[in-house]
Amino acid sequence: MLEKLIEEFKQIFHSSEAIRCFFAPGRVNLIGEHTDYNGGHVFPCSLSIGTYAVVQKRHDRKIRMYSKNFSEAGVIESSLEQLTYKTEDDWANYPKGVMDTFKKHGYDLPFGFDILFFGNIPNGAGLSSSASIELVTCVLLNKILELNIDMMDLVKMAQQAENEFIGVSCGIMDQFAIGMGKENQAVLLNCQTLEYQYSPLQLTDAVLVISNTNKRRGLADSKYNERRMECERALSDLQTSLSINSLGDLTKEQFEKHKSLIQNEVDCKRAKHAVYENERTKEAVAKLQNGDLKGFGQLMNESHCSLRDDYEVSGKELDALVEAAWLQEGVIGSRMTGAGFGGCTISIVQKAQVDRFVEKVRNTYYEKTSLEAEFYVVTVGEGARELTLEAV
Ligand code: NG1
Ligand code: MG
């Protein structure tokens, strides 16, 4: 595949300089949803699908970028002097945002680049195609400019680009999982302290299946911000009597004892999810580490119910996919993943049952929603990196 991308690169850009290739994965969160911005834990892993970037230096200060996924847009041109957000530049705002953030951090970008991007993760489905483009850009700048920035700092710069340049106030989970991911491991991240711990995914007889509802996440942005506000209100009510920094500081027992401090009933339900989901995530990882995959799966199912009933970020399509999955033989666990309102679900399924699982869930989902679901059996790959051409 890399060879083909390099050929295409040469056809689009007059190639005169050494060509280098980079990759950043997509990510999926196994459990710990809507906990990152509540100072709780998440448990994501990086995928072996993601975003490729083929790059060469330029002799001027132009940035010329082409995405194979949005070929109708052609080559999008900007310059290092004018890295401004433009609606019409669409996907190209992500790499521009990263370059702008590097400049804000005082890193001099002495020349421009020609870049071809290609992503094999579905866009806008909750697998973080945007953070994947951000991180691939971070790594290519870091390597080509020989800056030697730590991956953890690149992760924070990518998040800053998303927050400030794109204007999405996301937590750190996506960029972290994509930058710091390791093959066949998921990572438990404390989003408050940024302490993390890798945990092997011992899925000998099982596989991870991502199912895309193909329902666009229309409400996701506005509802996402609404949920953040509801949790902040609940937190400040609790802080009138408790000295805590975030909902992630509370145990379930403490929450039950003090929840009457929360003035608004809806805020209370949202906070309950944040507290319970955080505890559930730590519990699930402990089970996984003890070889109890079944117990892990049950907690994935409980996570879905909590997102559906207390956090109210699921929806007819996500529920239909998850409920269909729960009914199948060989299903260890299934839940929505990402912000919700559409996008994807994640299931752990026994290897021997996967084909049947896909067929049955596809049919049941279609009967209920008249939508075609897509399925991806994914493997857990390394985080963002340069690809050596010898490996082609
Ligand atoms: P998705 O929907 O996968 O992009 C969003 C946030 C995460 C996290 C999850 C909910 C963005 C870019 N990412 O993920 O930080 O809060 O929702 O767990 O908004
Ligand atoms: Mg995104």
Image (cartoon, helix red, strand yellow):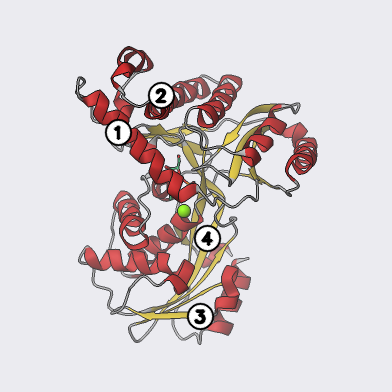
Residue bearing the label numbered 3: 75
**Amino acid type, label 4:** Thr
SS under mark 3: loop
Q: CA distance from mark 2 to mark 4?
A: 36 Å
**Amino acid type, label 2:** Lys
Identify the residue shown where x is 34% and y is 52%.
Answer: 155
Residue 51 - label: 4
Residue bearing the label numbered 2: 272
Taking the view exactly as shown, the residue that stands out farthest to the front is: 264
**Amino acid type, label 1:** Arg
**Amino acid type, label 3:** Val
Q: Quadrant of the C terminus?
A: bottom right
Q: CA distance from mark 1 to mark 3?
A: 45 Å
SS under mark 1: helix
Q: CA distance from mark 2 to mark 3?
A: 48 Å
SS under mark 2: helix
380 in relation to 347, above or below: below
- Left or right, 314 with respect to 65, comes to right
| Rendered image quadrant of residue 34 | top left
Dot 2 or dot 4: first in sequence order is 4
Residue bearing the label numbered 1: 233
Give the number of the mark in front: 1 or 2. Answer: 1
Mark 2 beta carbon near ligand 1 (under 8 Å): no
Q: Residues within 10 Å of mark 3 (few under 14, many from 20)?
A: many
Dot 4 or dot 1: first in sequence order is 4
- Left or right, 137 with respect to 350, comes to left
Dot 4 or dot 3: first in sequence order is 4
- Left or right, 138 with respect to 49, comes to left
Residue 294 position in % (x across, y down): 61, 21
Residue 232 position in % (x across, y down): 30, 35
